[in-house]
Amino acid sequence: MSKFQVITPVDGSVYAECQLHTPSDIDNALSLAGKAQKEWRNLSVAERKPYIEKFIEAFRGMTDRISEELSWQMGRPISHSPFEVRGTIERTTGMLDLAEKSLADVLVDEISGFNRYIKKEPLGTVFVIPAWNYPYLIAINTIVPALLAGNAVILKHSAQTPLVAERFSDAFREAGLPEGLFQYLHLDHLDTANVIRDPRIGFVSFTGSVSGGHQIQKVAAESFVGVGLELGGKDPAYVCNDANLDFVVENLVEGAFFNAGQSCCGIERIYVEENTFDRFVEGYVELTKKYKLGNPLDKETNLGPVAKRGGAEAVKFQIETALKAGAKALIDPSLFPETELGFNYLAPQVLIDVDHSMEIMTEESFGPVVGIMKVRNDEEALALMNDSQYGLTASIWTEDEEKAINIGNKVETGTWFMNRCDYLDPYLSWTGVKNTGRGCTLSTIGYEQLTRPKSYHLRIKTH
């Protein structure tokens, strides 16, 4: 049986070793899932909910262990890691609250002598392939609603965060979830593709890169299995002249650098109206300089290493290329001597004199860097925000709600924020446009891709 290693970004050592599952393991898991789901689907939503409620309590009890493992696996500061536990519980609670409403039969207009309605049926076994950057939060977006909808779930997590799958399994086991309804598999790319091809899979949920999404879609196209894709992002913020600058600076610095900038919906490009530009940039730089880069196991650290060396190399390349093209860096890396801890430790960087000829403003960075551009007016800001192959979230920072709504109606994005960023509300749909992908999680709408409609047309009078 083959093994793979988790290389921690903390110090480059081997943090964990995991066994890859064999084809026999895969076949057994799929068979067990199918058998368990046939019984699970016959329970009402009300009968399924207590298992998820017990999962919440079991998961909450693992907070310290989960937090430390996250810091070792992906480099997130230990002071921030409990946030993911709280967020996972928040989303789970929200999806529990929405379950019965979302999964209720759809009634149609009455006709004398007929009973007509649409039932929302489970798809069978849902295959979940989440990303490593928010490994619990991303996975839970599909896992919990899939189970509440009457499906079984098989989780294949990232090789960077495989222990996340094991902790999910522990929590569901403690909750007493019937055997086979939730399982995880550690797989290589070939076996992942083979699971997608397997006719026992009813739906595939993938979060990752655009290139990864194309590969998933290519394999899934061999059958008619449904696929949900959450891919890249290059999320913009627009700061207007009437914005509360102290509030905006604090939120946009955190929006860019939390989790070392490794957030699908993190702030990667900022457009600022010209009368506000200088004051905004000054405040932004000063607050950025206060970050503490270092070992994520140190409770004083609030900026940890980038999870993967390849990601660090990509960020450095984007910065260097932008500087050669005329951009100006406002943060002296020598202010962060902790960069000597290893290649994955990157100083936060703020760039100005940037434009859309530079990758730093058009391609996903996924690291602690942000570009800031001056704009003349709303029209220029709107054009620049829409000048992207991505569309996950975008935000406006203003005191004028009507203006926010008017611009929001024209922005090509899945979520439009006013005076907020980098946040998922479980009661709102989480979706994207363009190369950010397709499909939806969270909200009542998120349940739709995890069920299929079945129409009942019953003539109850024959004479």
Image: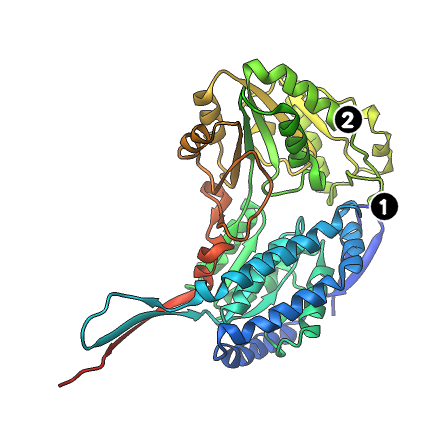
> Which amino acid type is marked by label 1?
Asp
Quadrant the C terminus occupies:
bottom left
Residue 21, disc: none
Mark 1 crowd level (few <14, some 14–19, many ≥20, 10 Å Cα) = some
Mark 2 crowd level (few <14, some 14–19, many ≥20, 10 Å Cα) = some
Quadrant the N terminus occupies:
bottom right
Q: Where is residue 422 in the image (x, y as percent from the top left)?
A: 60, 41
- Depicted 131 relative to depicted 331: above or below: below
User: Position of 303 compared to 403: left or right?
Assistant: right
Q: Where is residue 123 in the image (x, y as percent from the top left)?
A: 46, 69
User: Position of 103 compared to 135: left or right?
Assistant: left
Q: Which residue is drawn at 72% across and 20% down?
A: 330
Closer to the eye: label 2 or 1: 2
User: Position of 366 compared to 163: left or right?
Assistant: left
Q: Residue at x 71, y 67 (%)?
A: 58
Q: Position of residue 210 (x, y in %)?
A: 54, 45
Instruction: Measure the C-alpha gap from mark 2 to mark 1.
Output: 24 Å
State the residue position of label 1. 11
Q: Which of marks 2 and 1 is nearer the N terminus?
A: 1
What element does badge 2 sit on? loop
Q: Is residue 328 among what the camera can see? A: no
How many marks do you count on the picture? 2
Depth check, front residue: 311 or 53:
53
Q: Residue at x 44, y 25 (%)?
A: 383
- Depicted 227 relative to depicted 347: above or below: below
State the residue position of label 2. 289
Depth check, front residue: 404 or 336:
404
What element does badge 1 sit on? loop
Depth check, front residue: 113 or 227:
113
